[in-house]
Amino acid sequence: MSSKSLGGAGIKAFIKKYAMMLVFVVIVIFFTIMTDGIFLQPRNLSNLFRQMAIIGVLATGMSLVIVSGNIDLSVGTFLGFVSGLASAGMVWWNWRTPAAILLGILVGVVVGFLHGMLIAYLKLPAFITTLGTQFVFRGGLLGVIKGQTVAPLHESFVFIGQGYLARSVGWIIAIVATVLFIISVFNRRKKNKQLGIQSNPIGKDIVKIIAFIVVVFVFVYLMNIYEGIPVPTLILLGLSLLYTFIAEKTTFGRSVYAIGGNSMAAQYAGINVNRVITVVYMLSGALSAVAGLIMAARLNAGSPQSGLFMETDAIASAVIGGISMAGGTGKVYGALFGALLMASLDNGMSMMNVETFWQYIVKGAVLVLAVLFDIQSKSKK
């Protein structure tokens, strides 16, 4: 085979591997040009990351649901239900902030448990089950808040959605994250050596460390130019790290991937498929509740429109991030990237005053293209 054909194959492989990353770069450049650079200004970036937090938390919870070979179409309306429930609790029923948060998350866990029982144990199709509960939660929201906006909420609660970390705290987090990342890289090399597994070249790991440092410190610097790191962004990053650890470093996480790859084989291997799927839905319910709480805090209100169509954004974020709708493959942090891309589309089109109907068309087209890319990738394999 000629060097020319090898080069062409290498370019195709690179484009295939980083297709969505290249799309994201094009989107950023386009919106930067069309907004005369305002898109990349620190104030707008802060707003972008705050906007991304809600869909990012939803997509993080959705990631393992899809990896397990299932789906949850109710996360958007359930987000709205928890948002309305917490708001009504604080305004009408004298709930304090801790009670509103804990009860909201508890409701999410219970709803996830019910989903798991219906889907895993009673064998109801996930699509139909969660489509049905989508309407239930939509009606529940309107009933709880009586079809009206409920406001204002406690200041301590609003901080969750509107607050910022002190600039010094941001730098401390950046330093701690860098130290932990370096330790994890060299611990992995040490463990590979003990197991007789070949590690990456040391130069490659050093480049990875440098890239991590640049990204983290530039991010903190840009956020600190405005007001500091938004609290919702910190919540999102913390939950994503926790979920990544669960997915990649625990027996439970490996079981989820095994079930998504081949449910029958996983059952023969001794995995309690029904229990694992139920826990996956419980985790998704908890994260959907957290997203709903952030939504209420960001708006300082419970709104009848909260959560509408957000399940579509969550699914799109997961698929764009490389999580296969067929199940069994994908990374949690991929959903985080997908959420960033979707939030960038929302933010950029809003800044350009694009009409709402076009925004829905563009986002829908992106989802279809992402699924098409996923299917083509699987068929070629």
Image (cartoon, rainbow, N blue to C red):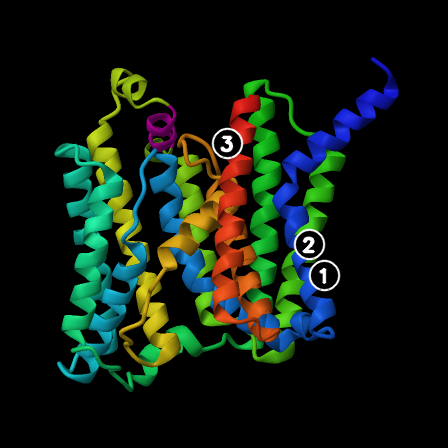
Q: Secondary structure at mark 3?
A: helix
Q: Quadrant of the C terminus?
A: top right
Is residue 239 at least partly visible in the picture? no
Image quadrant assignment for residue 352 = bottom right
Q: CA distance from mark 2 to mark 1?
A: 6 Å
Is label 2 in contact with label 1 (beta carbons under 8 Å)? yes
Q: Residue at x 68, y 70 (%)?
A: 40
Upstream in the sequence, badge 3 or badge 2?
A: 2
Q: Residue at x 15, y 83 (%)?
A: 92
- The dot on residue 29 is 1
Q: Which label lies toward us, 1 or 3?
A: 3
As drawn, is 307 to the left or to the right of 225? left
Instruction: Say which residue label 2 marks.
Output: 25
- In the image, residue 124 lies at what x, y percent? 17, 36
- Relative to 189, say whether 288 is above or below: below
Image quadrant assignment for residue 376 = top right
Upstream in the sequence, badge 1 or badge 3?
A: 1
Is label 3 in contact with label 2 (beta carbons under 8 Å)? no
Q: CA distance from mark 3 to mark 2?
A: 23 Å
Instruction: Say which residue label 3 marks.
Output: 375
Q: Secondary structure at mark 2?
A: helix
Magenta segment: 254-261
